[in-house]
Image (spheres, rainbow, N blue to C red):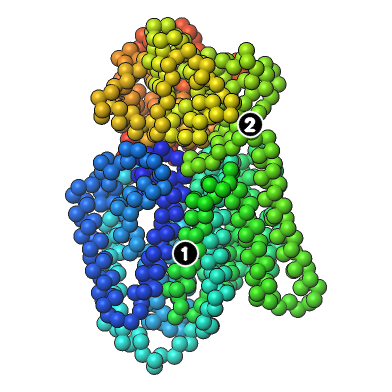
Amino acid sequence: MIGKYFLPWFGGTPAVWSTVMLFFQVLLTGGYAYAHWLIGKGRRREIIHLVLICFSVVLMLVLSLVWKSPVTPGIGWKPNNPGFPIWGIFKLLTISVGLPFFLLSTNSPLMQVWFNRTYPGRSPYKLYALSNVGSLVALLSYPILVEPYLTMQNQGYIWSLGYILFAALVLYGVIRTIKFKKDFNTNQVVQATIESKIRPDKKSRVLWVMLSACASMLLLAMTSHITQEVAVIPFLWILPLSIYLLSFVLAFSGERWYSRQIYLVLLFLMILFFRWALLSGPNLGIPAQLAIYMAALFVCCMICHGELYRLRPSPEYLTSFYFIVSAGGALGGVLVNFVAPYIFKGYWELPLSLVFCSLLLLALMVFYKIRLRFRLLFILNNVLIICVVSISALITYWYIDGMYKNTLVSYRNFYGVIRVIEKDEKGWPSSAYQLLHGITIHGVQLEEKTQRKLTTAYYSEGSGVGLAILNHPERGNGMSIGVCGLGVGTLAAYGQPGDTYRFYEINPAIIQLAQGEGDYFSYLMDSQAQIEVVPGDARISLERELAAGNKQNYDILVLDTFSSDSIPVHLLDLQAFELYLQHLQEDGILAVHISNHHLDLVPVVWNLADFFKLARVLIDDPGTEITAIHSIWMLLSPDPGLLNVPEITGRSSSMEKYKTNIRMWTDDYSNLFQILK
């Protein structure tokens, strides 16, 4: 909920999700550390917890008077210039949900400690599995039962009511703990627990950190890989997170779900399939790739969490165990979010995490000798683990070498991996440079000097945006064109003397390449128009310009802002279109690029056009021109005459009987499920 709320404030990039996840991992560690301190001696500690719970509820009630809901800050908190986005996201999360989540995170270890004191002969660790069942149910139900029916404001209030109920139950637990603390601390009760009373040594504590860090790294790395390199499908990030939570549920439900020997064999097999999927790539098909990657993630997470459960201490060390495990998870998140983008040019942490998992399993087999009845099984076991480690290392080398041997340059930052490759397709006048964001083409330019100004990809003369520019009545009279999304700057090729093309782009790496770094793309430099590039999120930049009294009065405003293969939702809602129209001339055209493999964006734009009483045409260009790519554009205008010209109507698709019953998207409501193809 809170990740979706802040997503538009930072450009709608998928990296916002992983940053939010990292924040919660870090805060979870703090909550577990606090819980470990809380169970110590002294009644004052329970009183402190009581005060913090009451304060958080009072604070929530106060914020409900000044914000849209107690956990969703007002528009005044939106960053004017995100700068380094991670710190901005952390700041907003701390302000909005920091204290409530911090106190929520203490619940699992405290409940288990209270349970162990009340029922000393029963294992409290199954409660941890139960808590992860709750997390899994919430994760899967949110996009199906919550998001489609409730606005963000209503979600915030309902969640806050749930938190108040939680606070009441915790108050009951704290009061009961204070009342019966003497009974809990008596030595008359024999601790006949299921768990063995072994004081954890340094080796075990290190392994706790390493195993949890490895699982966290695998989760985040696999999420980045499948959402950027396999398929940009909405909600696909839910799949690996569900696998991760499921492995916790199974591993902490009892040792019957995990056998080291069986999972060693499964790891060996999954590594072979993993190598096949990496090398085959798109040729394997999306379903097969996802099946292999999720199976590999499940096996690795079961190994990490299964071994964690085997290494669990007796309940008296329960809170320190969870604190160290959560610290390991946070460490994995830090490595993926902070370290990897600066030392790797691609998502190399994925195969490296696989190597890490294999090495940990080898270390466990060395430190904790496995008892096997037959010597032959012992030998086969060791040979297998050596093969697993060796193949994992080879896969890492093959992946890095194979993925980037045809790459001319690669950049990685908060917004993903950007690569430039050289490609020569049959029928093209010459070879060309392509800009790729994940698996999505973001621009193409031919290398031959005489062909450098040819408009390509989604921006050919037969595309919707090409038709809008070439047939606008102000063509040749000094047009003002705004473009949300730079790509390689292909649209600048339409520029004529006296024209002004103003591009808005959030990714600094794309700006550098489009402006000529590496001499791959030259559309901006070759254009006859005046070129302006505005760094930052397009909507935030347009809002800032309007607030400063700088209406741009565009003849054409192009919406071509992609986050890999999906337009960020905050650029396709009511408030966004209201902003666009304020920057558009009364006889202007709004050109919206809605090409998408997985989403049908026509009803979304159709609703907006109806609301603002705009004329509209749909241009579905098959890409018959040389180097053109299939594209779908919707052209909207307050002046129907601008779109009622033979060159446009002759290429448009009939929408005379088109209807839609989807709900209007706003800043407070959107639903991707209803437009899935």
Image spot of residue 62 (x, y percent): 19, 54
Q: Is residue 457 visible?
A: no
Report the residue at 32% width, 38% height from top: 80
User: What residue is drawn where x is 47% and y is 32%?
Assistant: 562
**Which image quarter: residue 170?**
bottom left
Give the residue at mark 1: 327
Which amino acid type is marked by label 1?
Ala
- In this picture, is 409 found above or below 125? above
Q: Give the class, few, some or many, for how many residues have Cα within 10 Å of label 2's Cα (few <14, many ≥20).
A: some
Q: Looking at the picture, which amino acid does disc 2 mark?
A: Ile
Q: Any mark on residue 92, and which?
A: none
Q: Residues within 10 Å of mark 1 (few under 14, many from 20)?
A: many
* Mark before the other along the chain sequence, 2 or 1: 1
Q: Is residue 359 above or below residue 538?
A: below
Q: Which residue is mark 2?
A: 421
Q: Is residue 659 above or below residue 173?
A: above
- In the figure, 254 relative to 453: above or below? below
